[in-house]
Amino acid sequence: MKQLTDDHVLFINASQNRNGNTARIGKQLITTPHYQQLNLVDYKIYQIGQAFSDDQFAEVVDQIQQASHLILGTPVYWHAMSGCLKVLLERLSQMDNPEKISVFVQDADPSETEGPTKNIVRRFTNVLGMDYQEI
Ligand SMILES: Cc1cc2nc3c(=O)[nH]c(=O)nc-3n(C[C@H](O)[C@H](O)[C@H](O)COP(=O)(O)O)c2cc1C
């Protein structure tokens, strides 16, 4: 994996754990001193199409739109990206997003899930006119 040194990096930790393996690997990969970590577990982000008054998606979007590089980190949950990351991507597809996006996937052996997850994020960036940066 390449190490990243961009300036306005927002790391989105899509794990149920704020300081678990995903956060730990994020720290190893992201070498820029000023990156911020957003833990999806701290926000209520309802499924696309749902409309509940306590939805916090807008708070997450505010932080995302201040970043120039969004780094998504997800554990493998049942051979796929975590559900909270999938919901986030579905909802972000209706928004303006940062210039650049990267994703990493982790578990004991993420090889089966890494390719499909990266393909989804690569396709997402293509459709929305963003750059995909491999890590
Ligand atoms: C609901 C759930 C499903 C999981 N599914 C898989 C899986 O399919 N394959 C795998 O290797 N690990 C699986 N794991 C293990 C996690 O991917 C692994 O422990 C990961 O490092 C957890 O990251 P975290 O510390 O950031 O939460 C699963 C864990 C949970 C909680």
Image: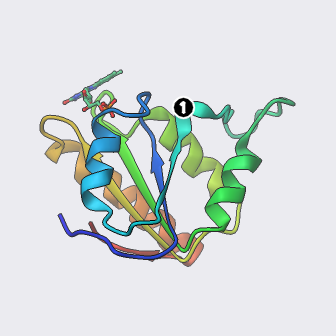
Horizontal side, residue 87 vs residue 25: left or right: right
The answer to whether 63 is drawn above or below residue 32 in the figure is: above
Cβ(mark 1) to ligand 1 < 8 Å? Answer: no
Residue that sits furthest to the right in the current view: 53
In this rendering, the count of numbered labels is 1
Along the line of sight, which residue is nearer the eye, 100 or 62? 62
| Residue linked to disc 1 | 41
Q: Position of residue 121 (x, y in %)?
A: 42, 60
Q: Residue at x 26, y 60 (%)?
A: 29
| Residue 73 appears in view | yes
**Where ligand 1 lies, by image quadrant?**
top left
Give me the residue at 31% from left, 66% from top: 31
Residue at coordinates 32% horizontally, 58% vertically from top-left? 118
Colour convention: rainbow
Please tell me whether residue 76 is drawn above or below residue 119 in the rendered image. Answer: above
- Quadrant where the image shows the C terminus: bottom left
Q: Is residue 123 left or right of residue 5?
A: right
**Numbered disc 1: secondary structure:** helix
Look at the image and tell me in which quarter the N terminus lies: bottom left
- Binning the other alpha carbons within 10 Å of mark 1 as few (below 14), some (14 to 19) or many (20 upward) gives some
Identify residue type, mark 1.
Answer: Val
Left or right side of 113 for 91? right
In this rendering, is residue 76 above or below 125? above
- In percent of width and height, residue 132 lies at 40, 73
Identify which residue is drawn at 31% across, 71% down: 4
30 left or right, relative to 42: left
Comparing 43 with 113, the one in front is 43
Give the percent coordinates (x, y) of residue 70. 49, 64
Residue 94 seen by the camera? no
x and y percent of residue 103 in the render? Answer: 36, 58
